[in-house]
Every structure is written in C-alpha cells, then in structure tokens.
Image (tube, rainbow, N blue to C red):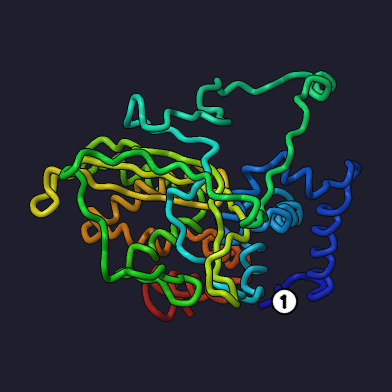
C-alpha cells in the first residue's frame, strides 16, 4: 500500500529512498570497512548473527553498515538473505564436551574440575566511560591479535574440548530427557506453536531478540512463585566444531569452528512428586559471544518446563521474542491507516451523538 495522499506519490517514495541511501553511503567520514566492523564491533556482529540464525561475520557486518547500526534491522536483513540460500547439508550432533572454551566459569563451585578460566571479560571492570584522548588511545593500543579462524580442516584441528563441569550429586537432579523429542525441531520448516517439543523452544530462544529475551526472563524470574534462587552451574564461551557427513564416505568431518556461548543453570524444585526435592536444570546455547542471552535462555528453558500452563510462558517465548517479527509489526504501523482511523472516528461520533440523526 502506498502513500496516495503524499504529494508526488511514487516520486516522493523514490526520493525518500535516495535520501536514506545518501545518509548511509555519504558523509564526510572515511568509508567504514567490513573488517573494522568485525574487528571493533564483534559483540554487535555476534548478536546480529545469532538473531538471524546465520553464522556469516562479513555478511553481518554488511547488514550493520546498511542498517546504519540498527541491530534489529540488521538481523532482519541477514535473516531475509538467509532464506534465499540453498540448504546443502545437515550438521551432525556434537557433544558439549567438544567445545574448546576460551572462557569457563562455574559460579556454583569454588574449585570446579579444570579450574575457573575468566578469559576476556569486563565483569569485574567498573562501568566508567573511557575518556582517554583519541591520539593517546591509538598510540597505547595493544598490537592486533591474529583473527580467529572459522574454517578449520579436521586434519589440523583435533578436538581439544573440555568436559562440562560436574552436575549436582546423584539423585538431586530432575530428569529432563524426553524420548518423544529425538531430533531437533526445525522452526524454519514448521510453525512453532505452544505444545512443541523442547528443541523448538530452545531454537526459538537462540534466534530471539536479545533485549526482549533478557527482559522476559527477568520479568518472570522476579515473580513470587519463582522466588527460589537461580544459580548457574557453568557458563562457557568458545569454539564448537561444525560437523557434517562426508558425501562419499558417510563419516563425520569437521568443516568449521563456530563461536558459541553456553550456560547451564539450576533452581530448587519445590513441586510435588515426581520432581520434588530436586534441582531443575535449564540449558542455553547461542551463536557468538552473548553470555547474557545464554544465561537468560537457560533460565527461561527451566521456567517454561516448570510452569508453562499457568502463566502461558511458552506462548510468549514462541511468539513474542522474534526480532524480525517485532520489527515487521512496528514497520506496518507506519503504513497508511486512514481508512481504519476514519471508521473509528465515525463510530465514536455515532456513540456520542444524542440521537442517530445528529451523527449523520
């Protein structure tokens, strides 16, 4: 639907598109290179790739540049591009022990097996804006590190994974295994509605808009019925090998390494039998460096399993967290609505009129 009431019609729309393109490509500053975005704005790139469901750093950088830094729009651009790509193969299941961590903390344990690995983090840094002079910052900057390789041949990169930290003592953990959900639910091929298996919920949360996901988790976790403390067993960040079956031999081969964030969190379970007096466990895994999303995802996974019928949390997880869907609804509000508005105005005038004849 076009803006027929706008002077110029299609000419005005074309002019508006040219103005937006000028703002995106013009300006007095230097051209923003893709490697600058991937190298300096890595967290933004990871977030866009996660919400789009596509691991492609350079394409994500292009989307960020095209959207002028609007990460929600960038994720929508990248997901739209993803829908045009052919599906060449399906990846094989990879155990969590194959993850090669660069950061690994276990808040539930003082001395976990393998020790705590803080890695690169700002968790212990005061939130103070750095006002160092630009010239000084450039001269004191550390040397650039070697970029991480995403495509690693299986012959030169054997798995050096670290097993996940130990679970609570035997008998204290509720069994979350579901034999009716043997294969991952593909939400890109089948609609996800309440009642879908756990794999569908985990996939939906892995692609969810990060801000919406963390907000929903915080909103639900602060309710009185969820007052039991939530404790992360482990939070890991690192490279997970991507494996597919060789087209000729049928054997699994590693074709790449993908950065992921993984979290496991537990809450005490005060429900009656069969899960009473045990820990409930939640799991989260998402693309890139996004620890907040992984933790919130694990918390929501646990809470949906615990009480999905009372507060209809599952429905909110499946329908209200998708970034492109949220953006699409907002965009449609900017399209013409004068017919609806006029009909509502006429109806309200009819209701306020003393008699029907005065409303005519």
- Mark 1: few/some/many CA within 10 Å (<14, 14-19, 20+): few
179 lies left or right of 237: left
Residue at 43% across, 39% down: 235
- Asked where in the image residue 247 lies, by quadrant, the reply is bottom right
Q: Which residue is mark 1?
A: 4
34 lies left or right of 346: right
Residue 75 seen by the camera: no
- From the top left corner, tell me how far across and down residue 178 is, in percent: 26, 64
Residue 296 vs 17, above or below: the answer is: above
- From the top left corner, tell me how far across and down residue 228 is, in percent: 22, 37
Query: In the image shown, does 261 or 40 lie closer to the viewer?
Result: 261
- Asked where in the image residue 183 lies, by quadrant, the reply is bottom left
User: Looking at the image, how many numbered discs can be counted on the residues?
Assistant: 1
The quarter in which the N terminus is drawn is bottom right
Residue at 52% across, 44% down: 160
- From the top left corner, tell me how far across and down residue 185 is, in percent: 41, 70
Residue 343 seen by the camera: yes
- From the top left corner, tell me how far across and down residue 92 is, in percent: 49, 66
Residue at 78% across, 28% down: 143
- Asked where in the image residue 327 lies, by quadrant, the reply is bottom right
């Amino acid at each position: 639907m076009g803006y027929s009431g706008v002077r110029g019609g299609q000419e005005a729309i074309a002019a508006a598109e040219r103005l937006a393109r000028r703002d995106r490509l013009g300006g007095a500053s230097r051209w923003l290179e893709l490697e600058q975005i991937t190298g300096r704005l890595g967290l933004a790139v990871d977030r866009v790739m996660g919400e789009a469901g596509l691991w492609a750093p350079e394409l994500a950088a292009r989307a960020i540049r095209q959207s002028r830094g609007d990460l929600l729009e960038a994720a929508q651009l990248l997901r739209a591009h993803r829908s045009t790509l052919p599906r060449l193969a399906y990846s094989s299941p990879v155990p969590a022990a194959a993850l090669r961590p660069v950061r690994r903390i276990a808040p539930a344990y003082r001395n976990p097996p393998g020790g705590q690995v803080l890695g690169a983090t700002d968790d212990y840094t005061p939130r103070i804006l750095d006002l160092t002079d630009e010239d000084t910052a450039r001269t004191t900057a550390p040397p650039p590190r070697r970029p991480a390789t995403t495509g690693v041949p299986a012959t030169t990169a054997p798995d050096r994974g670290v097993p996940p930290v130990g679970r609570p003592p035997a008998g204290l953990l509720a069994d979350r295994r579901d034999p009716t959900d043997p294969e991952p639910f593909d939400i890109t091929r089948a609609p996800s509605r309440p009642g879908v298996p756990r794999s569908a919920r985990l996939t939906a949360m892995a692609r969810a808009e990060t801000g919406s996901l963390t907000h929903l988790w915080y909103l639900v976790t602060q309710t009185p019925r969820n007052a039991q403390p939530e404790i992360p067993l482990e939070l890991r960040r690192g490279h997970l090998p991507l494996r597919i079956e060789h087209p000729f031999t049928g054997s699994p081969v590693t074709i790449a390494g993908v950065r992921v964030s993984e979290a496991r969190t537990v809450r005490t379970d005060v429900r009656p039998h069969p899960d009473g007096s045990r820990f409930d466990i939640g799991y989260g895994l998402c693309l890139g460096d996004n620890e907040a999303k992984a933790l919130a995802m694990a918390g929501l996974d646990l809470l949906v399993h615990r009480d999905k019928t009372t507060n209809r949390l599952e429905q909110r997880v499946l329908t209200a967290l998708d970034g492109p869907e949220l953006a699409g609804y907002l965009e449609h509000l900017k399209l013409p609505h004068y017919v609806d508005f006029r009909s509502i105005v006429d109806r309200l005038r009819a209701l306020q009129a003393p008699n029907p004849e005065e409303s005519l």
